Amino acid sequence: MQVAMDKLFGGREGLIGLAILAALIFVIMPLSFDIFRLNLVGKYLSYAFVAIGLVLCWGYGGILSLGQGIFFGLGGYCMAMFLKLEASDPESTKIQSTPGIPDFMDWNQLTALPWFWEPFHSLTFTMVAIIAVPCIFAFIISVAMFKRRVGGVYFAIITQAVALILTILIVGQQGYTGGINGMTDLRTLKGWDIRTDEAKYVLYFLNGALLIGCIMVGRLIITSKLGRLLLAMRDREDRVRFSGYDVSSFKVFVFCVGAAMAAIGGAMFTLQVGFMSPSFVGIVPSIEMVIFTAVGGRMSLIGAVYGALIVNFAKTYFSESFPELWLFLMGGLFIAVVMLFPNGLAGIYTSHIRPRLAAWKAGRSSPKPPPSAPAAEPEHDTPSRPAERPPAAAAAVPRTLAAGIQSEPSR
């Protein structure tokens, strides 16, 4: 039982942290915000999936990816394709020149549904594709890079280039992807209207439950032998390789796990927001996702969630209150956090709060000194006995008295 709790929750301290986060997501925020703001929080939490994946890749594996928006977008587009097909039934699209296909295909003069769209009529296939497509793409990228020992800054630049290429591809293939506008007007999921307030509440809680599940999966990875190997690879990759381990395979695995988590976040984003566009795939959103992790703490799964929430709350507040300055304020916030707290907000807890809590607990648990015994009152019935003196002092007293008697002059 204790072993399972340590692996899934990170011990008692991790369990308390997870319970506080769950209370914040499932109790405090739903009671504090209206449905509009709560839907915004759900959108922020969908970004937290990416941040958790980056903790595994960057914080523990030492793999800095500046292209996580690729996998976020792929997961979102897979979900959007299913929702778009459901919204494009022949009855709803009867005014088009070709009924039964998405509106942007009709605008681009396509007369039939492309072959790779056909499987997305099935929800089961879509659920599998949300995980499989980004993982396959991540596997191809990571195998091509890590097997050739490409890492560090070079890998970060390559992922950034891939994100840019995918964005250009999506925008350029407007007849198949919706172009720069993306896929909009997503209304139902198997006949269930996802635009109602009740649906938004359900999707918010589902999003929170999946996020907690991803945190536990991440905790299971970092508390296993694989987690220790990831840390060793991050610090001394050559030593791990010389010890006989296939370093590239571990990197490929953790990179694919990060891609799968980002894809789940993208799918939940599409369900809650109701559209998906290439603006969530490119370089800028990918860098913002790294900022979420840096602010929250790249070594903390729960800290990354708080980082995603705080940065997006600040982004919304600054853009509403200071529409011309919010980008500068966001940049200042990031610089301040990185300069003052290089380990993120989680580092504040580790370096300042945890030692004080430990000292406070130690003070409470240490045994108190026994109370001093009250001084014994003198017994008035019996005469007090003279205090015992050391033998030398006791022997000196008679000699002093004897000397005094002998030196007394005779009268």
Image (cartoon, helix red, strand yellow):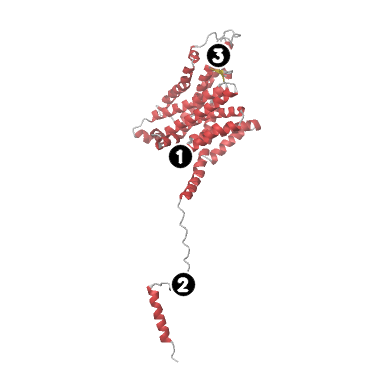
Q: Nearer the viewer, residue 316 or 13?
A: 13
Which amino acid is tagged 2? Asp
Q: Residues within 10 Å of mark 1 (few under 14, many from 20)?
A: few
Report helix, strand or loop for mark 1.
Answer: helix
Task: Give residue 94's position: percent from left, percent from top.
Answer: 59, 8
Residue 16 x %, y % = 49, 38
Residue 379 to residue 74: above or below: below
Which quadrant of the view contains residue 199?
top right
- The residue carrying pointer 2 sits among few (fewer than 14), some (14 to 19) or many (20 or more) residues within 10 Å by Cα, namely few
Residue 67 visible here: no
Secondary structure of the residue carrying tag 2 is loop
Q: Is residue 102 left or right of residue 324?
A: left
Label at residue 381? 2
> How far, Cα to Cα, is label 2 from label 3?
114 Å
Q: Which residue is mark 3?
A: 175
The residue depicted at 46 percent of the width and 34 percent of the height is 59
Q: Are marks 1 and 3 in contact (CB under 8 Å)?
A: no
Is residue 106 in sight in this rendering? yes
Viewer-side residue, 267 vs 377: 377
Position in image of residue 321 (x %, y %): 65, 32
Residue type, numbered disc 1: Arg
Q: In the image, 146: left or right of 94?
A: left
Contact? badges 1 and 2 (CB < 8 Å): no
* Label 3 secondary element: helix
Cα–Cα gap, marks 1 and 3: 53 Å
Q: Which mark is residue 12?
A: 1
The amino acid type of the residue labelled 3 equals Gly
Of labels 1 and 3, the one closer to you: 1
288 lies above or below 82 = below
The image quarter containing residue 386 is bottom left
